[in-house]
Image (tube, grey):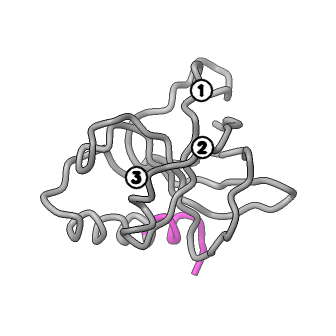
Amino acid sequence: MHFFGKIIRGRGAGRQLNFPTFNFEIPENLPAGGQGFKLAEGVHVARISWDLKTFPAILFFGRRETFDDKKALEVHILDEKILEAPESAKVEVLKKIRDVRKFASKEELKKQIAADCQKAREILGVK
């Protein structure tokens, strides 16, 4: 399943946690992958592509329960520092790895994101 999306400016919460994200405008009919498949809320293993480059990533879709309870669609690229976000990108969603949940602290959330990244590396075969 995949979708193309416009990247918008976020609040910088991911960057504060040392897991910067690209924030996507949530398309009205997410996803555009066909077959009536809908993107489930949660954390997913993904790949993000633009300008003929593809990066391994994790994707979060759902309410940011730990922060502001607003719905978000965000992608964190694994093991890369991207200095400037593109205007838009293609995201291929590969596998859901966990549901959305609220964390008691930002430190607890950071530990979980690190674990999510490690699980994604294992699934993608990235070291």
Residue at x-position 50% and y-position 50%:
59
CA–CA distance in space, label 1 to label 2 = 12 Å
Q: Of label 3 and label 1, which has the lower sequence position?
A: 1
Residue that numbered label 2 is attached to: 8
Residue at x-position 67% and y-position 26%:
32
Residue that numbered label 1 is attached to: 27
Kindly identify the amino acid type of the residue bearing the numbered disc 1: Pro
The spot of residue 68 in percent (x, y) is 27, 42
Residue that numbered label 3 is attached to: 97
Q: Quadrant of the N terminus?
A: top right
Kindly identify the amino acid type of the residue bearing the numbered disc 3: Ile
Q: Is residue 117 magenta?
A: no
Residue segment shown in magenta: 119-127
For discs 3 and 2, the disc positioned in front in the rendered view: 2
- Report helix, strand or loop for mark 3: strand
Q: Quadrant of residue 65?
A: top left
- Relative side of 64 to 84, left or right: left
**10 Å neighbourhood of mark 2: few (<14), some, or many (≥20)?**
some
Q: Is residue 124 magenta?
A: yes
Residue at x-position 39% and y-position 59%:
13
